[in-house]
Image (spheres, helix red, strand yellow):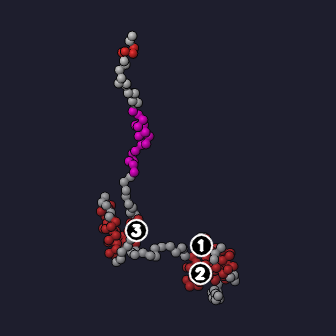
Amino acid sequence: MGQRAPFAAGTAERMAELMKQVSAKAPYQRVQCVWLATQGQTADQIAQALGWHPNSVRRVQRRFGVEGEAALLGGPAGGRRHQYLPEAAEARLLEPFLGPAERGGVLVATAVKAAYEQAVGRRVPKSTVYRLLARHGWRKVTPRPRHPKQAPAVQEAFKGGSPPRSPPRSRRRPSRAAGSG
């Protein structure tokens, strides 16, 4: 393995100051990673102290050497790295479809998909269009399963509220021969 380049003069003091200022755990550990290196600890020792893998220690120190303090204090990566269009362009693309839909019309996803594919210049799956619509606050509207004013207690009372049926009469006539004598 190669030797790590030494840090600039005053790095240890600056890292000690930053550790007092940073309140979140992840940036604090990144600052601590560099500070421990300025104290002469190896990547393996720092990794054990922080509960990291030695390669993660080397990666943080390498980024600090290239980017400076911004590499330590920056937030998580996150974001939309694999996008066909920026969000503003997506909003402009959806405008002709959303106007009629807001007035009670139907938003047809296949029409949005065709316009999106033309704007992007390639075919995209349907899921891309549905995620696009969700990103801009639209959802598939389906009929509700029951009426909002439905009262289950009233329905049950109605079901059991009919008077009981009287038993059916016998249609047989009593025989006179059996009773007379």
**How far is mark 2 from mark 3, CA to CA?**
36 Å
**Earlier-in-chain disc, 2 versus 1:** 1
Asked if labels 1 and 2 touch by Cβ distance under 8 angstroms, the answer is no
What is the x, y in percent for residue 1?
64, 88
Please tell me in which quadrant of the rendered image residue 10 appears: bottom right
Residue in the image at 67% along x and 78% along y: 46
Q: Which residue is mark 3?
A: 127
Q: Which residue is mark 1?
A: 26
Crowd rating for badge 1 (residues with CA inside 10 Å; few <14, some 14–19, many 20+): some
Label 1 residue SS:
helix
Could you tell me the amino acid type at mark 1? Ala
Up the image or down, 15 lies above or below 95; here it is below
Q: Is residue 31 visible?
A: no
Could you tell me the amino acid type at mark 3? Ser
Q: Nearer the viewer, residue 104 or 118?
A: 118
Crowd rating for badge 2 (residues with CA inside 10 Å; few <14, some 14–19, many 20+): few
Residue in the image at 39% along x and 61% along y: 139
Could you tell me the amino acid type at mark 2? Arg
In front: mark 2 or mark 3? Answer: 3
Left or right of 95: which side holds 16? right
| Residue 149 shown in magenta | yes
Asked if labels 1 and 3 touch by Cβ distance under 8 angstroms, the answer is no
> Magenta stretch?
145-162
Q: Nearer the viewer, residue 118 or 37?
A: 118
**How far is mark 2 from mark 1, CA to CA?**
14 Å
Q: Which mark is residue 59?
A: 2
Up the image or down, 155 lies above or below 2; here it is above
